[in-house]
Image: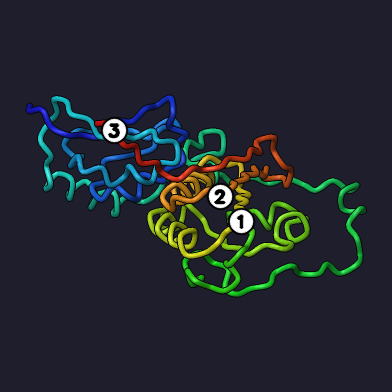
Amino acid sequence: MATRQIVKIDEEKCTGCGLCIPNCAEGALQIVDGKAKLITDKFCDGLGACLGHCPEDAIAVIEREAEEFDKKAAEVHLHKQKEAQPKPQPAPAFSGCPSSRAMHFKVSEAKTESISTTPAVSQLTQWPVQLKLVPVTAPYFQEAELLIAADCVPFAYANFHQDFLKGKAVVVGCPKLDDIRLYKEKLTEIFKSNSIKSVTVPYMEVPCCFGLVKVTEDAIAASGKNIPLKKVKIGICGEIKPEEEVRTFDPPRTFTHPH
């Protein structure tokens, strides 16, 4: 064995969201007992393509003694993965990403009876809304309060239009299903190219959804602007979790050393 670069996973930080799995081209990572694991050293090329997809910063590339990367073995492993038929697991043994776990819950009769019969008025004032589709310099971004919403939030939170969308420009996306690197680049350009007054990020309580908050934080920092950020965690039953906070990101400072 030789000393080389290889992936290391911090199990205390890892939430088992699975965002790193599809981004490892060699199939070296797997969710085991609710945590991401490196199957074997020889499947890991040490390039760290999975790093940017971990919302918890639980993955790092380190140097240590390890088996050499075996490209052929990794290809055989990937082929076997594709050929293997998925085996259904009973609900109690579920160990994947919590966002993919099937759940069923009922709405109480009291809540149903309290629903108003007056038709709600849409507060949407723009199109498109998908982050991948909106133009960076769309006129509705100028001097806007921007809402960056996880796309499951409007389904879970009943008063989304009145409580979140009213008076704001909006983009929506899913950090689990889309390219998180594209999100960061697009949001950074939006922040740089427009006078955004504030940003609000409502996101679901499942671990992988926090990736939307993190990529927004990174994009604000990369833009070099001071933009107030409010994040709001939404429970799967539609309640607001006590996780709100407001942060302001200062632009990078240049220090001059005295001669």
Give me the residue at 38% from left, 33% from top.
58
Which residue sits furthest left? Answer: 2
CA gap between label 3 and label 2 equals 28 Å
Give me the residue at 67% from left, 45% from top.
234
Structural crowding at the residue carrying mark 3, measured as other residues with C-alpha within 10 Å and reported as few (<14), some (14–19) or many (≥20): few
Q: Nearer the viewer, residue 255 or 241?
A: 255
Circle 1 is placed at which residue position? 197
C-beta proximity under 8 Å, tags 1 and 2: yes
Q: Position of residue 8 (x, y in %)?
A: 28, 30
Q: Position of residue 15 (x, y in %)?
A: 47, 34
- Secondary element at tag 3: loop
Circle 2 is placed at which residue position? 227
- Secondary element at tag 2: loop
CA gap between label 1 and label 2 equals 7 Å
C-beta proximity under 8 Å, tags 3 and 2: no
Q: Position of residue 42 (x, y in %)?
A: 16, 36
Circle 3 is placed at which residue position? 257
Q: Nearer the viewer, residue 136 or 74?
A: 136
The amino acid at mark 1 is: Lys
The amino acid at mark 3 is: His
Ranked by sequence position, the earlier of labels 3 and 2 is: 2
